[in-house]
Structures are given as C-alpha cells and as structure tokens.
Image: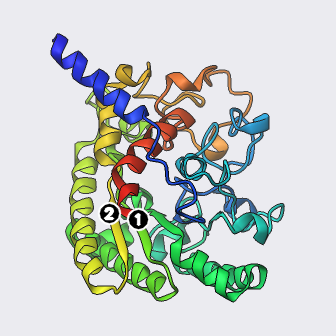
C-alpha cells in the first residue's frame, strides 16, 4: 500500500511539473475546437451555449466571466503562458481584442460544436468549417499587420491545437435519433475521423506545420453522465469511456499515417484520456476532494445557464473539485492537464 501511495505521489509531481520551456521557439498558438478551448467566441453569436455570466470566471483575473466554461483559465491559457507568450489566448470574435493581440495566439473555438456539422446545428454554434474560414480571415489580417514575410514565418512556426469531439457523441449521437439511425458507433467514429483528417489537410494546405490533434477525455466520468447512470451509485459510464478509447485509437492511427503524407508537417496526436483518468481514479493524489460531482449548483446536471450566480449549492472553493460544472473541469484541473499534455506532446515540436 505504501508503494502504491508513493507511485501516485510521483505521478502527481510529474503532472504538476512546469512544462518544458519553449520560450521564443513558438511565436503563436492557434486554437480550434469546442468548449474545452473556447475563450468566449459564443458570446458574439446567437446561441444559448454561453457562460459569460457569474459564477463563471469568478477565479479568472479580475473575477469576471469571459465566456470560458470554467471558474478561471482553460488549458490553452496555461499553455500560452508556459510558452512565454501572453497569459491568456483571446477569442477571435471578441471585439475588445485586435490583430496585435491575436498575433501571439487566438482561438476560433466554439462551445457545443463538433466535427459533425449536425452537432454544431444543435445549439447553432460555429461549425469546424466556419472556424477555418475565420482562420483564413485571420491570415489576411496578420499579413497586413506583420508584413507578408514575417506573417508567413509566424504561420509556419505557430503551434496549432485542435480539441473537439465529445459533443459529437454526448450532445448529438446519443442525444438525437439522426446519426444513430444512420451509423453504428464504429462507423460514426470513422465518419468523424474522416472529417478530422480533411480538416488537418486543409489546415496544412494553409501553411500550418506544427499540429496537435487532441483526443477525447474519459467522457463517461463527467458528472452529468454519472448522475444519469442510474443504478450504479454514480459510477462512470463505462460504455462512453470505451467509445472514447476506441475513437482515440482511430485518431492516433490516422495521425500516424497522415503525418507521413503531408510534406514538412509535424503532426502529433495528443491524448488526454490517461492523464485525466489518473486524476479521476486518484483525486486526493492531486489535491482534490470531490470527483463525482461538480462545484457549480448541485454539481450533477447544471452547466451554462443552469449555473446561476446565486445558487446556494455552489461550492466556495473550486480547487477541491475536479469539475467546475457538470461537463467542464475546474481551473486547477485544466492547469494539471495542460502541464501533462505539454510534457508529453510539446517536445515533438522542438
């Protein structure tokens, strides 16, 4: 037992280690995806998938809600800071920022979106193709701001992060009859992997070279899924976790093959499943007290507008919780995950 505890302590210390220093080697971080990496783009489109109100952002700089689905920073903010860039990555649609801010990092991500256009249609958010259109617009602005030669260098050397896919399963495939009547789970995974492949190829065609394609976390362990897993005492939904593992395996194989086909590319698969599962299985080793419920409201079902400022059930110290709302991690979890993924993935981009 003592040896096991020592192992968990070592794993915790490794996860908390600051990421390898890359300062000056990567000029910018360009982000695509869903709520895991949306810094507030949904504030500026007509959708209910928003979090620009309290108590979201209560632990952010200035204690203000930004549109991040978190009590504070999201993982990409910590990554930017570790790279010696700015302490946060701003949302492209936020009018309080301009190209001078975006030159060192920008996110085009939109909460509630997915690879599948049908997923983005559910809550009228930005589909992945639209995010790519905004990126093209960004390139034009960057060339006007930095000059063509320097902007081309920035585009070539920037780090491109993609974090998306959970909503395709939990908010689309298993929520509505459309896709599930068309595809088996395995065929739907193949369908999504095909979209991911096409997206990476288009991104590469626009000049991206250092690309990290993220996989799925143990989505069956989100508080919302635990709460609806009736009869198990709130255990993780094993089927959803199995699907995440299977999909991650398909993405990883696709990335391995595609990296050999795209000239000059440095394409890496970044897998959040295992580091996140270590937190879930051994929360106390990472300083957490609660893993099965979230900090916000009852911690079981609420996210977005369900997390109202005056809810008496909302916790006072989010650092004790793995999850902030029923779907999204706390700032502390995001920090741990950012360090774990940077240490496992970023060395490939040196």
Pointers 1 and 2 in contact (C-beta within 8 Å):
yes
Q: Is 197 left or right of 99, judged from the image as shown?
A: left
Whether residue 243 is visible here, answered yes or no, is yes
Q: Which mark is residue 142?
A: none
Q: Residue at x 54, y 63 (%)?
A: 26
Q: Residue 46, relative to residue 344: is it above or below?
A: below
> Which quadrant of the structure image shows residue 265?
bottom left
Q: Nearer the viewer, residue 235 or 27?
A: 27
What residue sits 53% from the left and 33% below the top? 332
| Dot label at residue 212 | 1
**On screen, 204 above or below 275?**
below
| Left/right of residue 139 with respect to residue 255 in the rendered view | right
The Cα atoms of the two marked residues, 1 and 2, are separated by 6 Å
Above or below, 25 against 344 in this view is below
Q: In terms of sequence position, does the residue under pointer 1 or pointer 2 come before the other?
A: 1
Q: Is residue 70 left or right of residue 199?
A: right
- The quadrant of the image that shows the N terminus is top left
Q: Position of residue 251 (x, y in %)?
A: 27, 67
Q: Residue furthest front?
A: 24
In the rendered view, tell whether residue 132 sits above or below residue 244.
Answer: below
**Circle 2 residues within 10 Å: few <14, some 14–19, many ≥20:** many
Give the farthest residue toward the right: 96
Q: Name the residue rendered at 69%, 58% in the picture.
A: 90
Name the element at disc 1.
strand
**Foreground pick, 27 / 338:** 27
Residue annotated with mark 2 = 269
Q: Residue at x 36, y 36 (%)?
A: 226
In the image, 263 versus 335, the foreground residue is 263
């Amino acid at each position: 037992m003592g040896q096991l505890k020592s192992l968990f302590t070592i794993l915790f210390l490794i996860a908390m280690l600051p990421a390898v220093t890359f300062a000056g080697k990567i000029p910018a971080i360009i982000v695509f995806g869903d709520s895991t990496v949306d810094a507030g783009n949904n504030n500026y489109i007509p959708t209910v998938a928003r979090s620009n109100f309290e108590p979201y952002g209560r632990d952010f700089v200035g204690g203000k809600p930004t549109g991040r689905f978190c009590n504070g920073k999201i993982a990409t903010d910590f990554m930017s800071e570790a790279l010696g860039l700015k302490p946060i990555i701003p949302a492209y649609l936020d009018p309080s920022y301009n190209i001078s801010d975006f030159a060192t990092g920008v996110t085009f991500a939109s909460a509630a979106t997915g690879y599948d256009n049908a997923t983005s249609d559910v809550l009228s958010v930005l589909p992945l193709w639209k995010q790519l259109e905004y990126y093209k617009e960004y390139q034009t602005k960057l060339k006007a701001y930095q000059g063509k030669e320097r902007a081309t260098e920035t585009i070539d050397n920037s780090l491109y992060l993609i974090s998306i896919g959970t909503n395709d399963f939990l908010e689309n495939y298993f929520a509505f009859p459309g896709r599930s009547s068309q595809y088996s789970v395995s065929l739907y995974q193949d369908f999504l992997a095909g979209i991911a492949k096409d997206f990476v190829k288009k991104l590469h065609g626009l000049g991206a070279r250092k690309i990290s394609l993220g996989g799925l976390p143990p989505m069956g362990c989100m508080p919302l899924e635990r709460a609806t897993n009736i009869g198990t005492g709130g255990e993780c939904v094993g089927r959803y976790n199995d699907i995440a593992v299977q999909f991650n395996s398909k993405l990883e194989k696709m990335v391995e093959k595609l990296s050999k086909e795209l000239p000059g590319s440095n394409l890496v698969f970044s897998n959040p499943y295992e580091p996140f599962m270590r937190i879930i299985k051994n929360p106390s080793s990472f300083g957490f007290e609660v893993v099965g419920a979230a900090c916000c409201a009852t911690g079981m079902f609420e996210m977005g507008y369900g997390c109202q400022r005056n809810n008496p059930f909302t916790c006072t110290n989010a650092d004790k919780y793995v999850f902030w709302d029923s779907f999204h991690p706390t700032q502390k979890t995001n920090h741990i995950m950012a360090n774990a993924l940077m240490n496992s993935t970023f060395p490939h981009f040196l």
